């Protein structure tokens, strides 16, 4: 079993003395080649500083503020204890093509980086140091039977083989629910794996706040307040679409902070979303507010409402994980047009309703200090779980950022192997708050 193997191999890892840093980083690629013989390093007997073990690190899915704090803190924990760290570039996109042939060879500097102490200065940097991708190596796996099917799990098996060929004895994954699913598959296939939750949507079970969430809210709030000032100056409305594929956490928090007059996400709707009914709701809201002397405002909706549209309205284009491309659906545009038309139909007047998407810019905003500290603790927690041999677990924190391990089994359905999504409960105080602070106060 993976856990037993991991404990035997790494039981005394934390007792090792720190070894000299191994050069990598983008600016140190040439020196890394000289130190380890360039391409000959691949598949060689190199096992990390001072001949010790190595861990691999993969970041998958979209960016999130403080991603580099996670990468930095995790890598430093291993490096300080003489454990080599390979940071694989562009998610799983390179590893999943591994087959041992010359064409699938992974080169240092091009396909992965051998991380060193220079990683200590990137905690506040934007973006993702290791870059990312939407590669989905477990796309064909729907059950445990599929996982045992060599054809359906071929890309997952390629990743495990590629990691082992590079001397990697354990893997750290950073990503959202789809990446957690992949991490579980890899662990079941024999690669000791620890997962760090990443999503600005904050819809993970097992952790109260995911790193980057509050930075995304802060970034969205600033944009909303700018739009609100514009709306107030022009007697207009902005219908703003915010990120949140399945859950309304960002939309609710940013809507409250940005003083929106109506805030809607998937949690507000039972069954399919009817765009005509939503437009009617918004037009009536604008009319009621005008009677109260309010001629402008913000209406916030979550992009995930597009995923709940009926078949005739649902966007057709999806990504590698089967998720709708919300940016191309432009739900806010169609709703703004319908709302303005209904307002004119009901009042005989014209009201400007401007559509606006606030999306990708929130994913790479400068991380606020809370997220830098949270991300750093999660990265450090990954090393701690490694020390304790707690593989097949997700890193979480509680109370005063105390580290805790959450087993994959608590987060993944044993039959479907799908991850559980944490929605905003309608009985929660956050849900009540967003309603209490909407019309007529927004």
Image: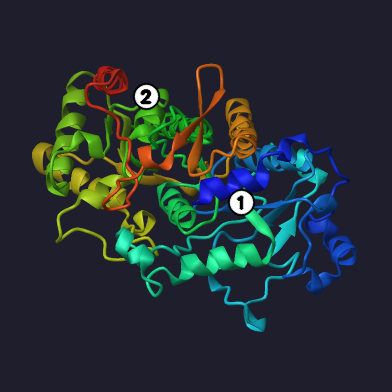
Colour scheme in use: rainbow
Image vertical order of residue 410 relative to residue 413, above or below: above
Q: As rendered, which of 56 and 116 lies closer to the eye?
A: 56
Does residue 65 appear to the left or right of 251 in the view shown? right
Spatial CA span between label 2 and label 1: 42 Å
Image vertical order of residue 31 relative to residue 52, above or below: below
Does residue 188 appear to the left or right of 403 in the view shown? left
Q: Residue at x 87, y 64 (%)?
A: 30
State the quadrant of the C terminus. top left
Q: Residue at x 28, y 51 (%)?
A: 331
**Which percent across, then down, holds residue 414?**
30, 48
Cβ atoms under marks 2 and 1 closer than 8 Å: no
Nearest to the eye among marks 2 and 1: give it. Answer: 1
Q: As rendered, which of 170 and 209 lies closer to the eye?
A: 170
Q: Residue at x 32, y 52 (%)?
A: 417
Q: As rendered, which of 104 and 71 lies closer to the eye?
A: 104
Q: Is residue 234 visible?
A: no
Disc 2 on helix, strand or loop?
A: helix
Q: Which mark is residue 256?
A: 2
Q: Which mark is residue 170?
A: 1
Image quarter of residue 298: top left
Image vertical order of residue 273 relative to residue 290, above or below: below
Q: Is residue 247 visible?
A: yes
């Amino acid at each position: 079993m993976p856990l037993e193997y991991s404990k035997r191999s790494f039981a005394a890892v934390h007792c090792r003395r720190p070894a000299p840093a191994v050069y990598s980083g983008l600016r140190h690629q040439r020196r890394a080649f000289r130190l380890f013989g360039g391409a000959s390093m691949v598949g060689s007997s190199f096992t990390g500083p001072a001949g010790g073990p190595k861990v691999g690190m993969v970041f998958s899915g979209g960016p999130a503020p403080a991603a580099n704090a996670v990468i930095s803190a995790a890598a430093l924990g291993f490096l300080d204890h003489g454990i080599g760290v390979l940071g694989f570039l562009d998610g799983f996109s390179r590893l999943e093509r591994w087959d041992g042939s010359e064409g699938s060879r992974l080169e240092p500097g091009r396909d992965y980086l051998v991380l060193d102490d220079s990683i200590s200065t990137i905690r506040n940097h934007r973006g993702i140091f290791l870059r990312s991708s939407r590669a989905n190596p477990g796309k064909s796996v729907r059950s445990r039977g599929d996982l045992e099917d060599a054809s359906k799990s071929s890309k997952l098996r390629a990743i495990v083989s590629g990691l082992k060929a590079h001397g990697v004895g354990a893997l750290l994954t950073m990503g959202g629910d789809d990446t957690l699913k992949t991490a579980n598959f890899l662990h079941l296939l024999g690669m000791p794996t620890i997962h760090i939750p990443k999503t600005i949507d904050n819809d993970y079970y097992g952790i109260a706040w995911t790193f980057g969430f509050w930075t995304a809210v802060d970034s969205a709030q600033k944009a909303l307040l700018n739009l609100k000032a514009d709306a107030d100056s022009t007697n207009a409305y902005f219908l703003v679409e915010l990120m949140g594929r399945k859950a309304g956490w960002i939309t609710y928090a940013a809507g409250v902070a940005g003083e929106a007059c109506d805030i809607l996400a998937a949690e507000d709707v039972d069954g399919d979303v009817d765009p005509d009914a939503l437009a009617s709701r918004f037009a009536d809201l604008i009319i009621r507010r005008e009677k109260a002397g309010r001629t402008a405002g913000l209406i916030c909706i979550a992009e995930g409402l597009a995923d709940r549209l009926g078949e005739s309205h649902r966007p057709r284009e999806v990504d590698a994980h089967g998720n709708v491309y919300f940016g191309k659906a432009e739900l806010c545009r169609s709703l703004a047009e319908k709302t303005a038309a209904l307002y004119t139909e009901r009042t005989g007047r014209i009201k400007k309703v401007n559509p606006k998407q606030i999306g990708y810019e929130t994913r790479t905003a400068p991380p606020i200090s809370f997220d830098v500290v949270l991300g750093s603790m999660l990265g450090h927690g990954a090393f701690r779980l490694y020390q304790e041999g707690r593989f097949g677990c997700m890193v979480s924190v509680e109370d005063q950022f105390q580290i805790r391990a959450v087993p994959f089994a608590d987060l993944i359905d044993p039959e479907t192997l799908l991850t559980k999504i944490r929605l905003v409960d309608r009985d929660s105080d956050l849900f009540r708050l967003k309603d209490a602070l909407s019309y007529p106060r927004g």
